[in-house]
Amino acid sequence: MNRLNGLRLHHRKNTENSQTEEFPLPAKVKIPLSMTMGVPCMPLVKAGDIVKVGQKIGDSDAAFSVPVHSSVSGTVTAISDYRTASGAVCKAVEIETDGQQTVSDEVKPPVVTDRSDFIKAVRESGACGLGGAGFPTHIKLAPKTPVDILVVNAAECEPYITADYREMIENANDVIGGIKLVQSQLGIKSVKLAIEANKPKAIKNFTKMAENDDSIDIVTLPSKYPQGAEKVIIYNSTGRIVKEGQLPSDTGVLVMNVSTIAFLYRYMQSGMPFVKRRLTVDGNAVGSPRNISTVIGTSFREILEYCGTDMDSVKKMISGGPMMGMSVPEADMPVVKTSSAILAFDHYDQRKTSACIRCGRCVKVCPVGLMPADIDRAYKIKNIEELKSLKVTLCMNCGSCTYICPANRKLAETNQLAKTLIPRK
């Protein structure tokens, strides 16, 4: 089977051997009530309320929404407006911690007797896709079409990030436990645990753990970006193609991030919802790069300073990886569920853009075979029919076209703007 196109990047996995450290409990946290692709939650608490760890503090009646829980015990000091990195505004619960980390009485292992109970429990856990997209997990686990393959996304193809790798190394039993849990609840017979080749220790370990289980196949993927993109990992691990307008489940495939599936296993044992996040802290402005585990709502500034970062030297901060991450507008933004990494750099090159030289490099690296230069031209003249014919909605915003362009054109950015012109069904 031919692999899809992509890039050979410098992986810069500087922290791959860094054991996860527990970050000290902060004096205060700010917990946004919108951390996923779902509908923002409304606060269930008010200023002056005493909250405990695992207590639900935000929820919504919308199906496409995920509840939010307190990551600390303490006193609610404010319900404020919060602007996310994407520019959206939601409510945030600000809490002054008491240092006790008292666990709420709400925290107890869920009772699951059937698939409906399982889906409800997953929603109550606050789980979402931890690979970056933040898709509500309970929605993903309730596909409208039959699914026969579970693809566990353990590629972690972005440079710098090693949070998922540390999950695999430190909590391998939880990963396997989560796989068996999802298999049993959804009746899935075949599992593809897909890992990039630059993680040989994880591949060797899981191959040994699954040697007596014919239902789990350890798939070694080439170390090429963007192996972790949903459409790419589905094709490269199963051979199935997710066509324009389709969901993975339309092809009989369910994709879950490796850290998400490990969390679900732990939640079913303990009942503790998603209130902590492991993330990688790296970049040339960081004095001591490492992987840390911290409560949701901790500020980026505190984490960077803990890792020996001279904040005055920082010229660029990114939440996530350098290819698909979001530029951080200010250092006091809080860690959210989808925070896989904080990258800080002491320089930022604003490269000059020039005219397209028609070299075709953007086409050669595009995983789904798009023509970014033609999309760029069609967008500028707002030719919607041509954008449709160029299949712009297939773009996954991996950034490969922008990265490879010798003219420094912002092709990936244009693709996203072009998609907004296409009427949504």
Image: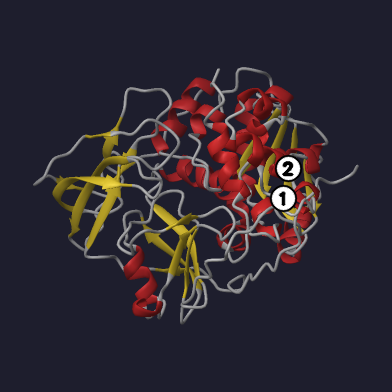
Q: Which residue is mark 1?
A: 227
Q: Say what amino acid the circle numbered 2 marks.
A: Val
Horizontal side of residue 336 vs 413, given as left or right? left
- Within 10 Å of disc 2 (Cα), the crowding (few <14, some 14-19, many 20+) is many
Q: Secondary structure at mark 2?
A: helix
Instruction: Specify the color scheme.
Output: secondary structure
The one of 270 and 89 positioned closer to us in this rendering: 89
Quadrant including the N terminus:
top right
Question: For the view shown, which residue lies furthest in the left direction?
Answer: 48
Residue 271 percent across, percent down from the top left: 40, 41
Residue 365 percent across, percent down from the top left: 77, 51
Give the number of the disc on residue 348. Answer: none
Horizontal side of residue 295 vs 396, given as left or right? left
In whole angstroms, how far apart are the C-alphas of marks 1 and 2?
6 Å
Give the number of the disc on residue 232. Answer: 2
Q: Cβ–Cβ below 8 Å for labels 1 and 2? A: yes
Instruction: Tell me if residue 221 comes above or below residue 379 in the rendering.
Output: below
The one of 365 and 265 positioned closer to us in this rendering: 365
First in sequence: mark 1 vs mark 2? 1
